[in-house]
Amino acid sequence: MRCPFCQSDDTKVLDTRLIDDGSQVRRRRECTSCGERYSTRETVDLNLPRLIKSDESRELFSEEKLRSGLLKALEKRPVKTSQIETSIARISRKLMTQAEREVPSAKIGEWVMEELKALDEV
């Protein structure tokens, strides 16, 4: 892993932990050139199903779009970012377990609403 501070390729791992129900690995690293410390996260890169939009167009599932929407929906609510990340992980896992290669975006919307209700009873 290249150091984000000095771009050196010589770094060492100080600590490794599982996070988000074991779906991610967090590594604490130190650059042996400049001595700076930083954290990285590793996730499995999976081929998720495509989403069928209401106009019948297809697009790839984007965790970033999901994260952005959840953050916007909960920006003035007392919900921790870690709770939102856990919800995103749950939704992604549900999507991965789908047998179909294409899933209606309305189905993702239903899962998001379930997560929002669980996060904040308003």
Image (cartoon, helix red, strand yellow):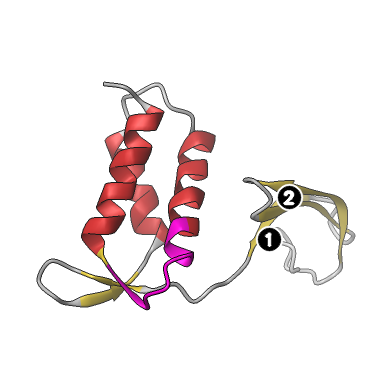
**Neighbours of disc 2 within 10 Å: few (<14), some (14-19), many (20+):** some
Task: Give the SS element for disc 1.
Answer: loop
Q: Residue at x 33, y 48 (%)?
A: 111
Q: Residue 81: percent from the left, percent from the top? A: 49, 35
Mark earlier in primary sequence (1, 2): 1
Task: Give the SS element for disc 2.
Answer: strand
- Using the image, determine if residue 87 lies above or below residue 40: above
- Using the image, determine if residue 83 lies above or below residue 108: above
Separation of marks 1 and 2 at Cα, in angstroms: 8 Å
Q: Residue at x 17, y 77 (%)?
A: 57
Residue bounds of the magenta highlight: 94-103
Q: Residue 86: percent from the left, percent from the top? A: 52, 42
Name the foreground residue: 36 vs 61.
61
Residue type at mark 2 is: Tyr
Q: Is residue 56 left or right of residue 29?
A: left
User: Which mark, by number, is residue 38?
Assistant: 2
User: Which mark, by number, is residue 4?
Assistant: 1
Q: Residue at x 58, y 71 (%)?
A: 45
**Magenta stretch containing residue 104, yes or no?**
no
Q: Residue 91: percent from the left, percent from the top? A: 43, 52
Cβ–Cβ under 8 Å for marks 1 and 2: yes
Q: Is residue 23 left or right of residue 8?
A: left
Residue type at mark 1 is: Pro
Q: Is residue 111 left or right of residue 52?
A: right
